[in-house]
Image (cartoon, rainbow, N blue to C red):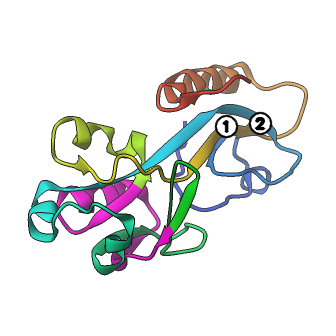
Amino acid sequence: VELCLEDMLTDLIGGGYDIGLRIGTLADSSLRVRRIGTMRTMLAAAPTWIAEHGKPRDPAVLGDRDGLVYANSNPPGVWKLARKGRSVEVRPRPRLKANNGDVLADAAVAGLGAVLLPESLIAAPLADGRLVRLLPEWEGPLSDLALLTPPGPTRPVRVQALLDHLAGSLAAQCRAVAE
């Protein structure tokens, strides 16, 4: 197994990859798609950040606070939130901009700012109290999670086995979606 981790769109066929994992809306292509589910995003911050900045009661106040921003979001530096049919866009002060969610989650745990990330990336620190969910009545955008493989009628058995294992493991981190 050779593992390549990049938070960018990679050419699976040109790169010689057997499987790709994509988060977000998929463009039409010749790739075979195995949709896993939908990931929800949520706002969170460390208790130390909340002690310093207060717990926000409205998304608008986050525009005046330090935020940890995913560099590959569209549009960059903008958090889109929704509640009961109402949508808002928030532009936090970007204290850190990174193209990797794990880095942003670690920075949030360290108290560097509030963050909007997929629930699966912050579930453990939320569960053990290192992070606290902010504005729980507001949801971030939903993102599709899919496994992609090059086109063709058959796959090697080892690739199919890994694909099945990944699909089962990742499905637990998503909202259930029928294939």
Mark 2: amino acid: Val
Q: Tell me the tag on residue 103.
A: none
Quadrant in the picture for the N terminus: top right
- In the image, the segment drawn in magenta is 89-116
Residue at the image point whose x is 63% and y is 21% from the top: 164
Give the class, few, some or many, for how many residues have Cα within 10 Å of label 1's Cα (few <14, many ≥20). Answer: many
Residue at the image point whose x is 90% and y is 27% from the top: 153
Mark 1: amino acid: Leu
Residue at the image point whose x is 38% and y is 65% from the top: 59
Q: Is residue 173 left or right of residue 49?
A: right
Image quarter of residue 107: bottom left
The image position of residue 91, as x and y in percent, is 44, 76
The image position of residue 60, as x and y in percent, is 38, 72
Q: Tell me the tag on residue 147.
A: 1
The image position of residue 112, as x and y in percent, is 21, 69
Residue at the image point whose x is 17% and y is 61% from the top: 110
Above or below, 42 relative to 129: below
Give the class, few, some or many, for how many residues have Cα within 10 Å of label 2's Cα (few <14, many ≥20). Answer: some
Q: Is residue 172 left or right of residue 147?
A: left
According to the picture, the residue beneath numbered tag 2 turns out to be 33
Q: Earlier in the sequence, mark 2 or mark 1?
A: 2
